[in-house]
Image: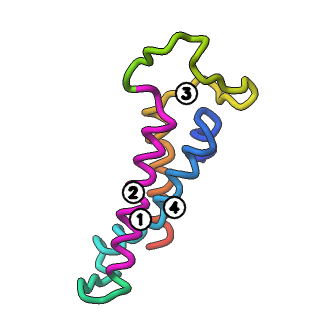
Amino acid sequence: MCGYVSIDYSSLVLGMAIMNLLRAFTFMLAIVLRTEKVNWKSSSSQAKLVETIISIFGAFLLTLHEGPPILRSSLPPSVQPRRLPFLLPRQSNGILDGFLLGAQAFLSSSSYVF
């Protein structure tokens, strides 16, 4: 339910970026609970670690891209890109949206591991 509420207030792109963390959360939780053994010399373990790092970096990058602007734009409003009004989400709260999506991904991955 956390994911549906968060997607309603944010964008679907942000929701899918965070949900790509599901595999990373599952892998990290399996390591913590010792159901997954990491052999640094094994190519399958290396592939899992690289995939985890790439998915975390990708979600971080998309969150920064889709989130609220960090720096103010120096362009006048007439030059700034406009979005179509029917594609805009409702009033967004970036911190709450990210927390709800992260909680949904973590809860889903913990249900897979348990």
Q: Position of residue 94 (x, y in %)?
A: 47, 32
Nearer the viewer's eye, disc 2 or disc 1?
Answer: 2
Residue nearest the observer in this picture, 86 or 90: 86
**Disc assigned to residue 24:** 1
**Mark 4 closeness class: few <14, some 14–19, many ≥20 residues within 10 Å:** some
**Disc assigned to residue 56:** 2
Magenta stretch, main secondary structure class:
helix
Position of 53 with respect to 5 (left or right) is: left
The residue that label 3 is drawn on is 92
Residue nearest the observer in this picture, 31 or 51: 51
**Magenta stretch contains residue 85:** no
Give whichever of discs 4 and 1 has the lower sequence position.
Answer: 1
Secondary structure under tag 1 reads helix
Secondary structure under tag 3 reads loop
- Asked if the residues shown at circle 3 and circle 1 are in contact, with their CB atoms under 8 angstroms apart, the answer is no
Mark 3 to mark 1: distance in Å?
26 Å
Quadrant of the drawing holding the C terminus = bottom left
- The amino acid type of the residue labelled 4 equals Ser
Q: Position of residue 113 (x, y in %)?
A: 44, 73
Mark 3 to mark 4: distance in Å?
23 Å
- The amino acid type of the residue labelled 1 equals Ala
Mark 4 to mark 1: distance in Å?
12 Å
- The amino acid type of the residue labelled 3 equals Ser
Give whichever of discs 2 and 1 has the lower sequence position.
Answer: 1
For this orientation, the residue located farthest to the left is 40
Give whichever of discs 2 and 3 has the lower sequence position.
Answer: 2
Q: Position of residue 97 (x, y in %)?
A: 50, 37
Q: Residue at x 34, y 87 (%)?
A: 43
The residue that label 4 is drawn on is 108
- Asked if the residues shown at circle 2 and circle 1 are in contact, with their CB atoms under 8 angstroms apart, the answer is yes
Give whichever of discs 3 and 1 has the lower sequence position.
Answer: 1
**Mark 3 closeness class: few <14, some 14–19, many ≥20 residues within 10 Å:** some
